[in-house]
Amino acid sequence: MKNENDPVITRFGEFVVNLLLRGLIGLAGLMPYRWRIPALGWMTARIVAPLAGYTRRVRENLAFVMPDLPASEVRRLSRAVPDNAGRNLMEMYSATEFSARARHSPVSGPGLPVIEKARAEGRPVIFVTGHLGSFNAARVAMVEQGFEMGVFYRPMKNRYFNVHYTDAMGALSQPMFEQGRRGMIQMTKHLRSGGVLAILNDLNAHGGVPLEFFGEPALTSLVTAELALKFDAPLVPVWGIRRDNGLDFDIHVEAPIPPGDPVEMTREFNARLEVQVRKHMDQWFWIHRRWKDGTGDMADLGAARLTAQPDGPP
């Protein structure tokens, strides 16, 4: 009997998820923009997330790092988190309408004078962020501010979905650098020329350092901090926070992380990201296996804590 790790089963599962998502994106795409964004959010939360196991993963992550969170809040986040993910997805597949709206997002924060000074001096700038709110909204808004932002990204695990997902992401802005040797070489040239780069640094990073995030060690890449030091670039956290109307955003540019030891710089980023996540719990991607390799087997620990809760799984 084949197990779930069999490559044939894995490919088939990816194929089915890709078909489902493509179908839902196509269906939502028939609607006007102001309806299609919440529509795909609703479909993702109520159809895709339960079938793909995302709902349970949200609950396991919350049980792992926030075991005392009230059951009512866990239930709310189990719906709200995939809803935000679905909105992000549909926004990317609505590049023209999304860009027209997001580029007018208000941009504020103490980091603005710093990055403007770096630009005037021809120095590179590195924006560091996470899967919070909408990174793409921040990306479009900063391009509108004159920062032609290159993006360093990790391909999606679903090989079928990744093909068109990457094309959709590239439609918002260029250049894009795929994680790997070739992408690193291209990115290095971009920074050497005084370019602007954005990196999402909140994924489980094989070869990273276990740094605290929500009180538990999470493998975190030091590359972003190391690049900032190597190229004398300000390392600036930026967040695209979704407004209550679900369609618009506020962009906040934080003060740069002080240069120093890469571990301490990355630890500071984790701390700042956690502050933002706690403010906007439903806007962070709790679906990721963020603590997968940080300590023991997070899935088993999260599942055990979830089972032990009075409410149990949904």
Image (spheres, helix red, strand yellow):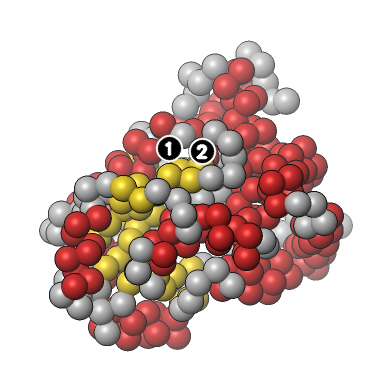
Q: What residue type is labelled 2?
A: Arg
Q: In this view, does 28 lie above or below 41?
A: below
Asked if residue 289 can be seen in this view, the reply is: no
Describe the element under mark 2 as helix, strand or loop.
Answer: loop
Describe the element under mark 1 as helix, strand or loop.
Answer: helix
Q: Is 221 or 131 nearer to us in this picture?
A: 131
Question: Residue at horizontal 80%, vertical 65%?
Answer: 15
Expressed as whole percent of the image width and height from the top left, the position of residue 59 reads: 61, 32
Question: Residue at horizontal 69%, vertical 46%?
Answer: 34
Dividing the picture into quarters, in which one does residue 214 lie? top left
Q: Do the residues labelled 2 and 1 touch (CB within 8 Å)?
A: no
Asked if residue 25 can be seen in this view, the reply is: yes
Q: In this view, does 183 lie above or below 283?
A: below
Chain-order first, disc 2 or disc 1: 2
Q: In which quarter of the image is the N terminus?
A: bottom right
Among all residues in the image, which is located at the extreme right?
1
Pointer 1 local density, CA inside 10 Å: few below 14, some 14–19, many at least 20: many
The label shown at residue 243 is: 2
Q: Is 129 or 225 nearer to us in this picture?
A: 129
**Left or right relative to 221: residue 20:** right
Question: Residue at horizontal 15%, vertical 54%?
Answer: 258
Expressed as whole percent of the image width and height from the top left, the position of residue 242 reads: 51, 42
In the picture of the structure, the residue carrying the numbered disc 1 is 277
**Left or right relative to 121: residue 96:** right
**Left or right relative to 120: residue 165:** right
